[in-house]
Image (cartoon, helix red, strand yellow):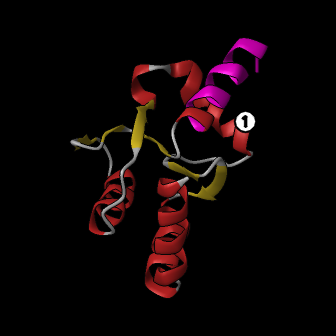
């Protein structure tokens, strides 16, 4: 990964308290996994930003290297990598209060 790409991803994550790297955007997800995370964030009333990896092949590959996670979507809350669709769904189903608290703390900071 180039230093420029790393800086670009760093900036997206630090400038946005809740950042979702996904296929499509929050208004029009382009895959079911991305849609699952969008629906959870919307249900919980989160204010978040998205980055459409389909529009930038460098970020699409770079975010996988950045997080050492092989799939998209990828959710960051307060600069911390939370996981992909499967982990976000698991948190929503089993640790909803914890997920809500993480979102609230990030939004308030």
Residue at horizontal 21 percent and vertical 42 percent from the top: 27
Q: Secondary structure at mark 1?
A: helix
Left or right: residue 74 versus residue 33 is: right
> How many marks can you see?
1
Question: Residue 15: image x %, image y %?
Answer: 55, 33
Question: Residue 79: image x %, image y %?
Answer: 65, 47
* Direction front: furthest residue: 108
For residue 98, what is the image quadrant?
bottom right
Main SS of the magenta part reads helix
Would you call the spot at circle 1 few (<14 residues within 10 Å), some (14-19), or many (20 or more)? few
The answer to whether 9 is drawn above or below residue 43 in the figure is above
Residue at horizontal 46 percent and vertical 30 percent from the top: 53
- In the image shown, does 90 or 45 lie closer to the viewer? 45
* Direction left: furthest residue: 27
Left or right: residue 33 versus residue 102 is: left
For residue 29, what is the image quadrant?
top left
For residue 8, what is the image quadrant?
top right
Q: State which region is magenta.
A: 1-13
Question: Residue 30: image x %, image y %?
Answer: 29, 41
Question: Residue 39: image x %, image y %?
Answer: 29, 61
Query: If the image is split into quadrants, where does the N terminus sit?
Result: top right
Task: Check if residue 11 falls in the magenta segment.
Answer: yes
The answer to whether 9 is drawn above or below residue 88 in the figure is above
The answer to whether 94 is drawn above or below residue 88 in the figure is below
The answer to whether 102 is drawn above or below residue 76 in the figure is below
Residue at horizontal 54 percent and vertical 56 percent from the top: 106
Task: Check if residue 100 falls in the magenta segment.
Answer: no
Q: Which residue is mark 1?
A: 65
Residue at horizontal 51 percent and vertical 38 percent from the top: 16
């Amino acid at each position: 990964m180039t230093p420029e790409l790393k800086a670009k991803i760093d900036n997206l994550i630090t400038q946005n308290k809740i950042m979702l790297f996904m296929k499509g955007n929050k208004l029009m997800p382009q895959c079911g996994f991305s849609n699952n995370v969008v629906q959870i964030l919307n249900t919980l009333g989160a204010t978040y930003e998205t980055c459409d990896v389909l529009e930038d092949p460098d970020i699409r590959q770079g975010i996988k290297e950045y997080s050492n996670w092989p799939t998209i979507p990828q959710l960051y809350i307060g600069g911390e990598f939370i996981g992909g669709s499967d982990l976000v769904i698991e948190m929503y189903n089993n640790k909803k209060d914890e997920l809500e608290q993480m979102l609230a703390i990030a939004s308030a900071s």
